[in-house]
Image (tube, grey):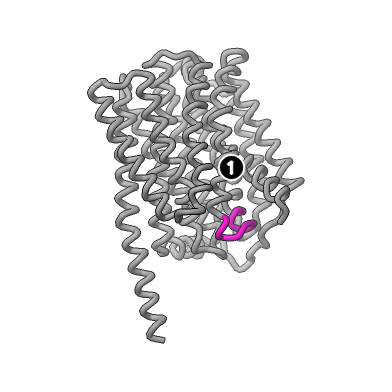
Amino acid sequence: MTQQRYIFLILILGSLTALSPFSIDMYLPGFKAIARDLHTSESRIALSLSSFFIGISGGQLLYGPLLDRFGRKKPLYTGLLLYILTSLLCAFVKDADTFIALRFIQAIGSCAAGVASVTMVRDLFPVEDNAKVFALLMLVLGASPMVAPTLGGYISVAFGWHIIFLVLAGLGLFNLIASWLWLPGSYQPDTTLSLKPRPILSNFWTVLREPQFYTYAFTGALAFAGLFVYVSGSPILFLSIFKVKEETYGWIFAGLSVGFIGSSQINTLMLKKYSSEQLIYAALTGQVLSSVIFLIGSINGWFGLAGSLFMLFIFLSCLGFANPNAAALSLAPFTRNAGSASALMGAFQMATGALASSFIGFFEQTSAVPMVTIMTITTVLALAILHFGRKTIRNKVTAAGSVAAMH
């Protein structure tokens, strides 16, 4: 594969991967306006984020088997068409309940792009390059939290929040056309795979029984949940508590994303010297320390706007190292079941993020404490699972070596 072709494929896959984050980030500056127009509270509008995360979680379990059975293209096109339709409907919604429901369906459409792009990394690139490719996807993906909320803030102020969803529909259409014209058919449909519930569950169970998968998938999901909590809590924290303007909020969101994006790219360089296992352990240790310090400081009133921004920057920078390595290590054992493994990994990530972020809606947020408490809990659990899961993986490798030696 030529270098030009390599980069072109990553750009297309990155555009697909960015669809869900754009759908999450772009309307955040419009929270207050949406709540006002739909005659409800910002906390209730925050539930539209949770419903989106739940939709992605369930949708990924749906698309995993479909991508393996029918190939990558047909399920991808179907999901993108659903996304375009629901984005248009969101632009003209009249009440909060319908909005929350439409966001759930929109998510089911968008996650076809996310699952397909992650799965095709495994199809198109050698296993030893997967962590590097995921890190490069993070660079493309990273444009969404930098561009989306900033663009959303200006659109919301100038034209109203409804236009944001028309722009998202246009983005879905672009991805549909780009996939149709330029994305290769990287995988032949496996007609032996059944779409009946029992074989699908059996296939998922085969993936789940692999210690390397469940260790790094659950670790990555819990670590990444901190980002979901931050995304859900940040509009209230910055717009209502720190009283920043919608446009300023977009720039703050973009600035914090630099830590997440920059560390994911430094990760590519670090992989030349260190293993993915070493990097994820170090990153999670840093993430735990930063969240604990942030929590103690928030409880005691040490951090104003500047201090909160600094602590969030450190937290997100650590996550930028952890995420691509967790994804690569989760999928490394699989070839035939790569679609199902990718779907399960994404489902764990989104379900965990949805559950963690939904707690934001139950608090009357008057400081950063509720948000940071949830971030700390999920990060500590991630490090604990990584610690004990690595022992399980080592035991399996030792047992397999003993059996091989006997023969």
Quarter occupied by residue 353: top left
Name the one closer to the observer, 294 or 270.
Answer: 270
Q: Position of residue 136 (x, y in %)?
A: 58, 45
Q: Which residue is mark 1?
A: 17
* Front-lying residue, 307 or 19: 307
User: Which quadrant: the N terminus?
Assistant: bottom right
> Mark 1: which amino acid?
Thr
Residue lying farthest right?
A: 181
Which residue appears at 54% of the width and 46% of the height? 135
> Residue drawn at (50%, 17%), measured in percent from left and top?
248
Give x and y (percent) for residue 30: 52, 20
Q: Quadrant of residue 64?
A: bottom right
Report the magenta residues as a range.
120-129
Residue 322 lies, in percent from the top left, at 43, 46
Q: Position of residue 308 (x, y in %)?
A: 36, 24
Q: Residue furthest front?
A: 273
Question: Which residue is depicted at the point 41% across and 81% down?
Answer: 404
Instruction: Identify the main secondary structure in magenta.
Output: helix
Relative depth, front residue between 116 and 92 = 116
